[in-house]
Amino acid sequence: MPSTTVLKVAVPVPLYQLFDYLPPEAGSMPAPGCRCEVAFGNRRLIGVVWGQGPTGADVSPRPIQRLIDDDPVLDADLRGLCQRAADYYHHPIGETLHTALPAALRRGEAAHWPGEQVWQLTSRGRHADAAQLTRAPRQRQALETLAAHPRGLTGAMLGALGITRQPLQALEKKGWTRLVSREPDDHERPASLLREVPLTPEPEQEGAIHALCEVQGFAPVLLDGVTGSGKTEVYLQAMEHQLRQGRQILVLVPEIGLTPQTIQRFRARFTVPVRVLHSGLTDRERLQTWVEAREGRAEIILGTRSAIFTPLARPGLIIIDEAHDGSFKQQEGLRYSARDLAVWRARLLDIPVVLGTATPALETLALARDGRFRHLRLKNRAGNARPPEIALEDCRELPPHRPLSERSLAALQQTLKDGHQALIFVNRRGYAPRLICGDCGWQAECPRCDSFLTWHKAEQRLRCHHCDLQRRLPRHCPDCGSTDLRDAGAGTEKLEEFLGEQVPDWPVIRIDRDSTRRRQSMSRQLERIGEGEPAVLVGTQMLAKGHHFRRLALAIVLEADAGFLSADFRGSEHASQLILQVAGRTGRGDAPGHVLIQTRHPELPHLRELISGDYHRIAETLLAERHAAGLPPFGHMALLRTESRQPDEGRKLLTDVAASAPALDGVQVLGPVPAPLEKRAGRFRQQLLLLAPTRRPLHRSLGAMLDHLLGHPRARRCRWHLDVDPIDLL
Ligand code: ADP
Ligand code: ZN
Ligand code: ZN
């Protein structure tokens, strides 16, 4: 058979190759980055054209079923980014592309804004006599409202005005209203870019703004500014510089909960369209933002991790706020670091990228030290705010059922009496992390995981925080029948109850994943805090990230020492960042900030170092320890993990795979060993850790091991995944 030119298509299947298909009609070759529907086995899948070439396999290729796009949905820079991510994370290209595309496009929907459905009056409706509707007041209200909005209103907008579907449909029957598709507004650019006068920068901010406006082309920058130093003002003024040149800005934040606050600050400053992308949107809303960014109509795009894949018509700047945060790393599928992808993408686009944080990841700090990142520092808080004062509160004598010491409680009461707000930080949701039988010592454990069940009191349930298993609260001990069931330890829910008793005159506002599950409830809670009345906030790390609380004068941190004692080599780094971020929420207004760190291990050297409040001091210590141990950022790591129903299956597979690894310079293959949480959701987890002083041999070993693994018969009986640069070893 003569070789013909075929399309090489990336198909969303867990296979590391492209597949051959014939173009729809001979002679017309769709461009790389266009989607097409293809037959794959007996399924129809949405693939992406990745290139063309001579046919590879002996079987004659099938034609593609349907070409979806005329213009590529993945332009050259995103294709480059995805290819690099697929190579670096050793992940199948087809699945990588699916991670990069919004859900609506993964399903094959058209890549243009579908238009908005709005209700309008017909010409008969415009001339109708509202007096005819005196017996149908709701129809009359709808008619009058629509008469006042000639361009039409969406169902959601009408709903907000108290107008339901029913009167609209009744009017439609009369031929007075209709539902039409409206093109998006063309934003007339207001004459002025700014809506408010920028702050006069402090000297350190001035230097950073100047440096950011000066850079040309690709430049990775670490904006290393203490909490409250006014990093946002630096972003805003650097953004202004880009917007004046007609360029777009992509901003990543760690949490969906931070988007309203940040959006508000951007909209208060600029008149240009600002759009969001995060998991709380519908697929349709996400597609809309994606299209607007691609067409250049959205000028500022703010999103969480996956927004790094947003197409940009006129890219100018990428900003990662709170860049140290762990949520920039995806923990399933393509386990990418959005922080690293942002730097790769900025290089592909030849634009600057700014990583802003008060507590840089040690990896980022090492890059800045080596001169590979520009290092801009803001060492002082902006305005009149002073740095918070941090003290250790020795709790070795505190009875286990008392969550707060006498001194902590007294400080809390004083803060509230002074008219300020206080925050209690405990990184554990639920009422209590354990339920124990007082007679025989039985503890409620998860049958599917190596862990205990958390008591959620309001729900009267026990829940596993690893696999989401739920149980009704038992009335008596299943082992001995005793009714003396006690809890141990404290979560946010218990703190809330405890504070309700201890400081009954002040409101307690709880913020954690359970209290903010409903849409908007987080922003409502934050609004209440923003009003500034004295109150106690209780929360998990959701509260620690980036928030600006004007009236917060005291933070009490519970059980922070656990991180310093953790088996994870990053435990101390993460605990230090968390504590300083919590501390950084205090003292941002006029009242000075105080922080009490309750601990049962006041002798821990890292903890003692932390009270200086100087992140760089502790970071130096931690970097020296990592250097001595050859751990990241001085070594590079990858984790190959299996999960199997049979306890031994994964271990045997990994043993064979480890044996297949070629002995390359300095690559250490450690394991297989059971994962720290060996059993999770009914599966046994084993892991192989690879550590190497440089990346190249690490990636070569991984490639060889993966080849071996993919051909191994046991691989089909286990789940497995590869995590390059893992941050969670548990
Ligand atoms: P960061 O993100 O660095 O923790 P923010 O950007 O939230 O800090 O700023 C902290 C506070 O300082 C905000 O209330 C902000 O309005 C104020 N601020 C920032 N820059 C200035 C300035 N140049 N002059 C006065 N106040 C400032
Ligand atoms: Zn018992
Ligand atoms: Zn479980």
Image: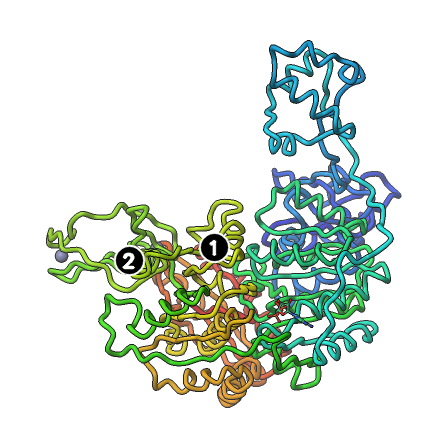
Q: Nearer the viewer, residue 309 or 30?
A: 309
The vertical placement of 322 against 54, above or below, is below
Instruction: Tell which residue pokes out farthest to the front in this image.
Output: 418
The quadrant of the rendered image in which ligand 2 is seen is bottom left
Left or right, 724 with respect to 209, comes to left
Q: Which residue: 71% across, 54% down?
A: 267
Left or right, 498 with respect to 10, comes to left
Q: Which residue: 24% across, 69% down?
A: 400
The vertical placement of 386 against 603, above or below, is above
Q: Nearer the viewer, residue 588 or 155?
A: 588
Q: CA distance from mark 1 to mark 2?
A: 56 Å
In the rendering, at what x and y percent does residue 596 appear? Answer: 40, 75
Q: Which residue: 32% across, 75% down?
A: 407
In the rendering, at what x and y percent does residue 377 appear? Answer: 66, 81
> Residue 398 shows which numbered tag?
none
Q: Which residue: 11% across, 54% down?
A: 480
Q: Amino acid at mark 2?
A: Glu
Query: What residue is shown with label 1?
Result: 716
The vertical placement of 645 against 205, above or below, is above
Q: Nearer the viewer, residue 233 or 116?
A: 233
Query: What residue is shown with label 2?
Result: 501
Answer whether residue 357 is visible to the viewer in this image: yes
